[in-house]
Amino acid sequence: MNSAKRYLQAAQTVYIACHIIPDGDAIGSLLGLGLGLRRLGKSCTMACADPVPAKFNFLTGWQDITAQPPKNEEVIVTIDSSDIERLGSLYDEHVFRSRPVINIDHHVTNTRFGTVNLVQLLPSTAEIVYALLRRLQAPLGKDIATALLVGLVTDTQCFRTSNVTAKQLRMAIAMMKVGASLTDITELVFNREPISTICLWGQALAHVQRRGRVMWTEIDQHMMRKCGAAPNEGNGLVSFLASTMGVDVAIVFREKDDGRIEVSMRAGHGWDVSEVALKLGGGGHPRAAGCTIAGKMAKVRELVLGEIEAALQKQAMAREEQNAEGS
């Protein structure tokens, strides 16, 4: 934290980038830090390789987010990215090697690629950004508080994930005292979906399959075009599938514009999908992880399902051994 503080205090120009296919934590943390540094008199470029999802267009500053890679900024900050590839087209190896990179993230699979690695295994990256802004003594306002509360609320699914403690509730209270509205955020983020997303969910749910305690579905480019869906639409589908009784792991396979397959995985309580995601070139949390794999849908599906089934079997055996030792 102190190293990140020193770099940011010394810099007058800062480039901040979040991961591709951004979620609420990525956008909220990006805006929270960017607006906070601007309040300290810094010149900040806020960037994301993919468009900001429409549901977050109530956040102050979202129009300022660019898809341009860094130029002459003194310091680069990456937000909510477990590895450098998650930055997509924003990553330029020459530029990133030529200046300090502050890696701010909360994923257990983070590869520590930064000059400074501000990686803490908390429920959201927004919490780390909040702590950093406090260390920098950046004055918070309703705009920053709202952005950070969006990050916290979305990555904890409205404080429903198993890693939520009183600490996250205290942060939420602090943001609300500054002016953020928890009611407005939950309404705008969770209860507002474009018709294209509803169409896409309908298409995907019609093709749900199950093998043992693993459930999955697939989204191809034909479905995307039929529904007029944006590349980052429908991200909540995998969590919905994971809520199915009798299912330990849910997976959504999505065909990207370039033909690669994006794999989103969610696990039930006590199961871990992060190791599979990391093995396949991705990352994430024990219960929420993903990766992107080159190949045809059928081959990618069988590869991932095989890895997941092997991982579940291994974890089940470890549980049995622990229970035997404890009895």
Image: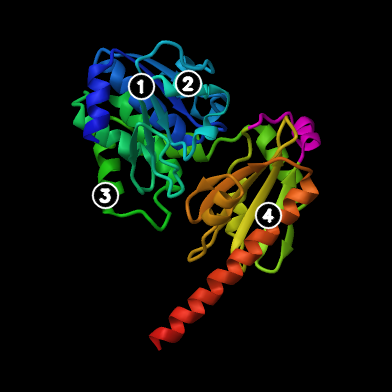
Q: Is residue 9 above or below residue 221?
A: above
Q: Which is closer to the viewer, label 2 or label 4?
A: 4
Q: CA distance from mark 3 to mark 1?
A: 24 Å
Give yes or no for contact between labels 1 and 4 (Cβ–Cβ under 8 Å).
no
Q: Which is closer to the viewer, label 1 or label 4?
A: 4
> Mark 3 belongs to which amino acid?
Lys
Regarding mark 1 in the picture, which secondary structure is present there?
A: helix
The residue depicted at 77 percent of the width and 39 percent of the height is 220
Q: Which is closer to the viewer, label 2 or label 3?
A: 2
Residue placed under numbered mark 3 in the picture: 167
Q: Earlier in the sequence, mark 3 or mark 1?
A: 1
Regarding mark 4 in the picture, which secondary structure is present there?
A: helix
User: Is 261 on the left or on the right of 275, as rendered?
Assistant: right
Q: Quadrant of the C terminus?
A: bottom left
> Mark 1 belongs to which amino acid?
Gly
Residue 227 is situated, as x and y percent measured from the top left of the image, at: 75, 33
Q: CA distance from mark 2 to mark 1?
A: 10 Å
Residue placed under numbered mark 4 in the picture: 304
> Mark 2 belongs to which amino acid?
Ala
Viewer-proximal residue, 183 or 53? 53
Residue 279 is situated, as x and y percent measured from the top left of the image, at: 58, 52
Regarding mark 2 in the picture, which secondary structure is present there?
A: strand
Residue placed under numbered mark 1 in the picture: 34
Magenta region: 220-231
Callout 3 environment at 10 Å: few (<14), some (14 to 19), or many (20+)? few
Residue 230 lies in the magenta stretch = yes
Residue 34 is situated, as x and y percent measured from the top left of the image, at: 36, 21
Q: Earlier in the sequence, mark 2 or mark 3?
A: 2
Which numbered tag is attached to residue 47? 2
Viewer-proximal residue, 154 or 96? 96
Q: Which is closer to the viewer, label 3 or label 1?
A: 1
